[in-house]
Amino acid sequence: MVSSVPRLVVAAPSSGSGKTTVATGLMAALTARGLAVSPHKVGPDYIDPGYHALATGRVGRNLDAYLCGPDLIAPLFAHGADGCDIAVVEGVMGLYDGAAGEGELASTAQVAKLLRAPVVLVVDASSQSRSVAALVHGFVSWDPEVRVGGVILNKVASDRHEGLLREALESVGVPVLGVLRRAARVETPSRHLGLVPVAERGAVAVEAVSAMAAQVAAGCDLSALVALARSAGALAGAAWDAGEVLVSSPPPPLPVPSPGAAPPDPHQPFGPRPRTPDGLVVAVAGGAAFTFSYAEHAELLAAAGAEVVVFDPLRDEELPEGTAGLVVGGGFPEVYASELSANEALREAVGGLARGGAPVAAECAGLLYLCRELDGLPMCGVLDASASMSERLTLGYRDAVAVTDSVLAAAGTRMRGHEFHRTVVEPGAGEEPAWGVRAPGRRVEGFVQRGVHASYLHTHWASEPGVARRFVERCRTS
């Protein structure tokens, strides 16, 4: 199979240059032209794909060469871009920045090379003129395998400033494909973990994305950008398919015995609900408090035989009817602690499900929700642990090994993950920890008890599809 979907990568010299504004605005502007746009994000970020989904009407997908491995980047891209007219990939950090100490691994540059895609470099020109030529020349020449096909100048102050920048860039030989003035309307608010997610902003997010689209359409040469995307090289190989990878992956070990037993709706982040003949329901937390999840997780659960039903712990007082297993991903429960605590009926339902031995997989925000309390407010009480906000940001990729048999993995299973939080859980691990982690130093973290697997670690199940099948099989037998 050969994928020839036109594509380009939006990158920058550093974070804060305007990648998200340009990438999201470009996606929305091309969608407004009638193109089916496939949105992608390099790295583990969950928030930017929400804006991408709003811009395109399609699920935003991540391409992370650390979590999934370089060999999965092209197949995952082809899966997401199937049937689309063009794909736009937003980079992460600076073009050549990747996993710490791992060379180019997980960098935007590596993903661009794996996708054989041209790069558009977004440059914050607010404090420079002729120096922009040296900057762009350096990024163009650093790695000859990375093809920088054009530059978009961001935060340009005036016509005179634009003229100076264009004159300087003539010597580099890289075309200027757009010039954007500073515009307050397209700036998106941030807080302790980055941008505020789409699901929390409602109509304001829609307005912001519309403003981004208008700015990009007015300031960029869309025809030239589409032509650049069409110059991408063909990708050989099959697209990733949840059903096929489950068939080809090793069968799951026996379940652990249980002792004693338009734009996408932000409350439905996985798109249309997958249905299965046997009606085995896996409830997945969504809504404004739980916005962090990779689309492939729901697809793998459905391929393994589950009916994925999204519910909102802020609004719903009951779990979906027939719930056999529960997945609570990442998000911002600390922002909504009072509302989550006030929904006592749902907290009791979650606690009852877990105490009955049903499979429960919780990541980061899910871990906090299962604790006894969060910032002094009662949570589900599944774990005898207390969570609280912290001044310290915990951030980075992690190599992990399962140290306890659980509903997700047999002991000894190796996975890569990512931590991203400003909270602390005490104790940090239960009597039976979830993971042994090599971060700086070595430690154990997380909780395995009965059917519960709760941890700070975000993982991408496409890298280990047996995780989803093991979870669903446990749902059948618990």
Image: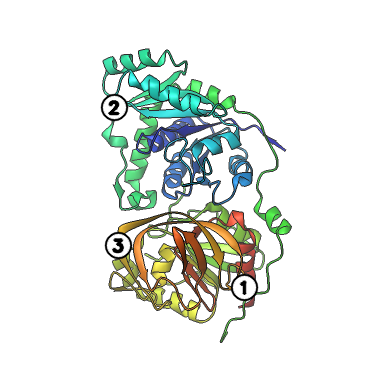
Q: What separation in Å lies between label 3 and label 1 (alpha carbons)?
A: 35 Å
Left-right relation of 101 to 341: right
User: Which one is earlier in the sequence, the residue at label 1 or at label 2?
Assistant: 2
**Amino acid type, residue under disc 3 in the picture:** Ser
Quadrant showing the N terminus = top right
User: Which one is earlier in the sequence, the residue at label 3 or at label 1?
Assistant: 3
* 199 is higher (above) or lower (below) than 159: below
| In this view, the mark in front (1 or 2) | 2
> In the rendered image, which residue does mark 1 sit on?
474
Quadrant showing the C terminus = bottom right
Q: Position of residue 304 (x, y in %)?
A: 65, 62
Q: What separation in Å lies between label 1 and label 2 (alpha carbons)?
A: 55 Å
Q: Are marks 3 and 2 in contact (CB under 8 Å)?
A: no
Left-right relation of 407 to 391: right
**Amino acid type, residue under disc 1 in the picture:** Arg
Which residue is at the far bottom? 260
Image disc number at residue 390: 3
Say what secondary structure mark 3 lies in: strand
Say what secondary structure mark 1 lies in: helix
Residue visible at 65% across and 54% down in the picture: 242
> In the rendered image, which residue does mark 2 sit on?
126
Say what secondary structure mark 2 lies in: loop
Task: Mark 1: give few (<14), some (14-19) or many (20+) Cα within 10 Å.
Answer: many
